[in-house]
């Protein structure tokens, strides 16, 4: 999808429905939405040079048997620091994503043409695998 700020609100609404369908409690859903939204905002604000509209992919999966939710946000921009105004008190997005998720990885592409952020949440709501008798 285009990495434009106007595209993020509809995605946030879809992610909210995803969290609800996955059965996330309200506090966990807020953390999920905040971290995922921050990953998307980072693409819009940092992945592409000013004036260039790039794209990004969002993938979200819920594994009810394992009790996990995994989100990946992938862009095709360049990993860079925002040097436009160093006096701005910014730069807390990665810390925010890390504190709102159970696991986080940032993988800049080795050739500098993209970054993938993976966020994961694990809950104690994993379902036991059915035994053979139940599958009869």
Image: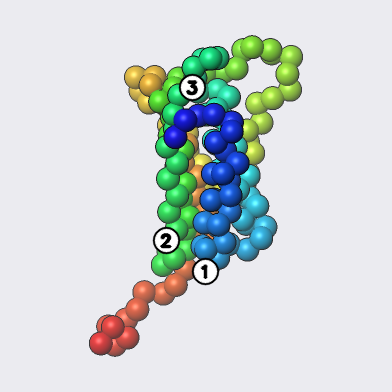
Q: Secondary structure at mark 1?
A: loop
The quarter in which the C terminus is drawn is bottom left
- Taking the spot 41% from the left edge, 74% from the top edge, the residue there is 128
Task: Specify whether 62 is left or right of 42.
Answer: left
Residue 74 x/y as whole percent: 43, 34
Q: Which disc number belongs to residue 63?
A: 2
Q: Nearer the N terminus, badge 2 or badge 3?
A: 3
The quarter in which the N terminus is drawn is top left
Q: How many numbered marks have been drawn onto this rendered protein structure?
A: 3
Q: Which disc number belongs to residue 125?
A: 1
Q: Tag 1: Cα neighbours inside 10 Å, few (<14), some, or many (≥20)?
A: few
Q: Nearer the N terminus, badge 1 or badge 2?
A: 2
- Taking the spot 44% from the left edge, 72% from the top edge, the residue there is 127
Q: Secondary structure at mark 2?
A: strand
The quarter of the displayed image where residue 107 is located: top left
Image vertical order of residue 82 relative to residue 115, above or below: above
Q: Nearer the viewer, mark 3 or mark 1?
A: 3
Q: Tag 3: Cα neighbours inside 10 Å, few (<14), some, or many (≥20)?
A: few
Q: Secondary structure at mark 3?
A: loop
Q: CA distance from mark 3 to mark 1?
A: 40 Å
Q: Nearer the viewer, mark 1 or mark 2?
A: 2
Is 40 or 105 nearer to us in this picture?
A: 40
Q: Tag 2: Cα neighbours inside 10 Å, few (<14), some, or many (≥20)?
A: few
Dot 3 corresponds to which residue? 53
Residue 102 x/y as whole percent: 55, 50
């Amino acid at each position: 999808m285009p990495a434009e700020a106007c595209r993020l609100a509809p995605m946030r609404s879809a992610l909210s429905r995803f969290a609800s369908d996955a059965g996330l409690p309200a506090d966990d859903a807020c953390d999920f939405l905040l971290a995922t939204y921050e990953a998307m905002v980072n693409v819009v604000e940092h992945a592409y040079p000013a004036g260039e509209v790039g794209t990004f992919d969002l993938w979200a999966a819920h594994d009810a048997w394992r009790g996990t939710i995994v989100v990946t946000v992938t862009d095709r921009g360049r990993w860079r620091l925002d040097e436009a105004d160093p006096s701005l008190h910014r730069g807390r997005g990665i810390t925010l994503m890390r504190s709102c998720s159970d696991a986080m990885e940032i993988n800049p592409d080795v050739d500098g043409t993209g970054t993938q952020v993976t966020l994961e949440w694990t809950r104690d709501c994993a379902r036991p695998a059915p035994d053979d008798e139940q599958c009869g």
